[in-house]
Image (cartoon, rainbow, N blue to C red):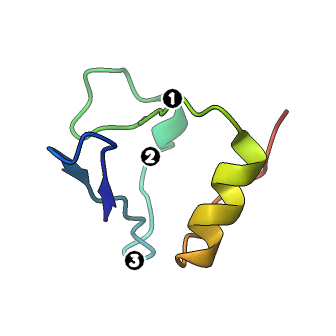
Amino acid sequence: MMRTPDGHSRLELSRFLAPAVVADHRHAPMHALGYLRVMFAVDDLDATRERVRKMGAQRVGELVR
């Protein structure tokens, strides 16, 4: 569970491991059921990654710079 910096909202990120994905969600249209992308602007990506890693966050995919 993530809390927004203003403290007014929360966002839960989850990943389902089962059942297996039937279709390739990477090619789903933006209006498909569910939210496919969530983005945050940060001042220092490396510092943010380290901070959330200490809280138990794990990177799901490859880091691309």
Disc number placed over residue 18 in the picture, else none: 3
Q: Position of residue 20 (x, y in %)?
A: 44, 69
For residue 64, above or below residue 29:
below
Q: Distance from label 2 to label 3 (Cα)?
A: 13 Å
Residue placed most toward the observer, 49 or 21: 49
Marks 2 and 1: which is nearer the front?
A: 1
What's the residue at 64%, 51% (across, down)?
48
What's the residue at 53%, 35% (across, down)?
26
Q: Earlier in the sequence, mark 2 or mark 3?
A: 3
Q: Amino acid at mark 3?
A: Ala
Residue placed most toward the observer, 51 or 30: 51
For residue 40, above or below residue 20:
above
Q: Is residue 56 left or right of residue 15?
A: right
Q: Quadrant of the C terminus?
A: top right
Can residue 59 be seen in this snapshot?
no
Q: Is residue 65 left or right of residue 16?
A: right
Helix, strand or loop status at disc 1: helix
> Which residue in the protein does label 2 denote?
23
Q: Are marks 2 and 1 in contact (CB under 8 Å)?
A: yes
- What residue occupies the far front of the structure in this picture? 6
Q: Position of residue 47 (x, y in %)?
A: 72, 52
What's the residue at 30%, 38% (across, down)?
35
